[in-house]
Amino acid sequence: MHKTMMDIYDLTGKTAIVTGGSQGLGESFARGLAKAGCSLVLTARTLSKLEKVAEEMARYGVRALPVQMDVNKREDIEAMVKEAVDKFGKIDILVNNAGISAVNEAENMTDSEWESVIRTNVGGVFRCSQVVGREMLKQGSGKIINIASMYSFVGASYVPQVSYTSSKAAVLGLTREMAVEWAPKGVQVVALAPGFFRSAQTIWAFEENKELGEKLLARIPMGRMGKLEELEGTIVYLASEASGYMAGQTLTLDGGFLSW
């Protein structure tokens, strides 16, 4: 029997880990996966926020497990993966969303600002991918979706953040290398590069600094920020059979920012 298009995008019976799942983009990724029927393991450093998101995900008839975790602590990641496997039996999808930024000019950036961003945005993605990837390699299947940025490709506009752009560029190289190593073993690794979406990390630049916001919007052909709900279908596409032939590639969702 041929599958319908709805069948191809259906994630019922799948389990996904979303790091940084307590707010913003991570919460939107979780919501999209939940709407497609996916069980969730939500991780972040603040458990109370995670618990609220997990409660909301239950509205879609899926199970959501909140786990306090720091992507910089390997023991946290290993404990989370064990708990996930114990509860759900397997891990099908990993969304490496957790990340931080530091705004400072290159000539003024401190070692601490540089190292904290690189350690979280690159090291955290690697550590989570490695620990979860080992489980996926055992089962011979899985999808890892690394959250990059449109600033993986270009320097940041008007807001200096050399550690952030460097870290997100590195995520693309990490994605390609893991894809080359693991695709023959059944594990797909891809990346999603969002532009400006309405979240706590970006809204200050648009609403608290009107002049800066106008400059940034002028760089976007669509003339607006992305809506968080516009991330939902994209993450489902990357997590589902619909993207079954993708490996090592990066999908950009930026309102046309990189088109000029």
Image (cartoon, rainbow, N blue to C red):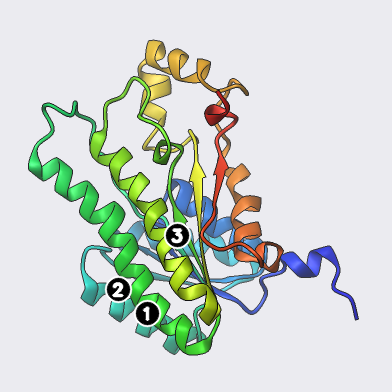
The residue labelled by disc 3 is 176
Residue at point 40%, 41% (across, down): 152
Q: State the separation of the CA atoms marked 1 and 2.
A: 6 Å
Residue type pointed to by label 2: Ile
| Vertical arrangement, residue 198 with respect to residue 112, above or below | above
Residue 64 circle label:
none
The residue labelled by disc 2 is 77
Residue 57, image x, y percentages? 55, 62
Residue at point 37%, 79% (across, down): 81
Q: Which-is-in-front pick, marks 3 and 2?
A: 3
Please state, as top left, top right, bottom left or bottom right, where the N terminus lies in the image: bottom right
The answer to whether residue 113 of the structure is visible from this angle is yes
| Vertical arrangement, residue 181 with respect to residue 98, above or below | below
The residue labelled by disc 1 is 81
Residue at point 47%, 75% (across, down): 182
Quadrant of the rendered image containing residue 225: top right
Residue sitting nearer the eye, 34 or 60:
34
| Vertical arrangement, residue 158 with respect to residue 93, above or below | above
Residue at point 40%, 76% (across, down): 132
